Image (cartoon, rainbow, N blue to C red):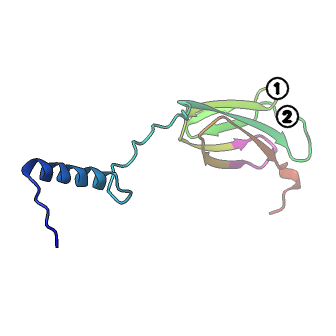
Amino acid sequence: MTSFRIGQAGAALLLASCVAVGCASPTAPSAPPAERPSTTLQPATVTLTVRVLPRSVETPLEGATVKRDAEVGHADAGGVCQFTLRAGDTANIGVSAPGFLPLGASAVLMNDQRWTFYLEPTDTATN
């Protein structure tokens, strides 16, 4: 049997080689990749456009009352009313007009949206 004698310099080189090879090993732990910041920007404010029409007719309901929480608006000649709110806020909308049953809807808005409400005339409603 042959024995080898390694001096201090040789032992240090052998140790350094083993450490370097071990660090490059595919099973060696590594730091997680840096998290990239999102490049998709959400708008600070969004616009909700509400259009009000009578059911079965495409004639706008000018003057219809459109409420968003405590904020009140009225539909213009095109039956449209707009609200600006912060992205991520909940839009609670209530729509009413004389001679029609009221209607409402709500949703969290992350971008601009258009909602159309078709109101039912009260004379055709059954109780």
Which quadrant holds the C terminus? bottom right
Residue 108 higher or lower than 1, as above or below: above
- Examine the structure image and report whether residue 91 is included in the region drawn in magenta: no
Q: CA distance from mark 2 to mark 1?
A: 7 Å
In terms of secondary structure, what is the magenta stretch mainly? loop
Residue 119 screen position, x and y as percent: 80, 46
Q: Residue at x 82, y 28 (%)?
A: 78
Q: Amino acid at mark 1?
A: Ala
Relative to 38, residue 26 above or below = below
The N terminus: image quadrant: bottom left
Question: Left or right of 27: which side holds 76?
Answer: right
Residue under the point 11% across and 47% down? 9
Residue bounds of the magenta highlight: 95-104
Residue farthest bottom in this picture: 1
The picture places residue 15, in percent across and down from the top left corner, at 18, 53
Q: Which residue is mark 1?
A: 77
- Measuring from the top left, give residue 20's x and y in whole percent: 27, 49
Measured along the vertical axis of the image, is residue 1 above or below residue 32?
below
Q: What element does badge 2 sit on?
A: loop
Residue labelled with disc 2: 60
**Which residue of the protein is positioned furthest toward the left in this rendering?**
8
Identify the amino acid type marked 2: Pro
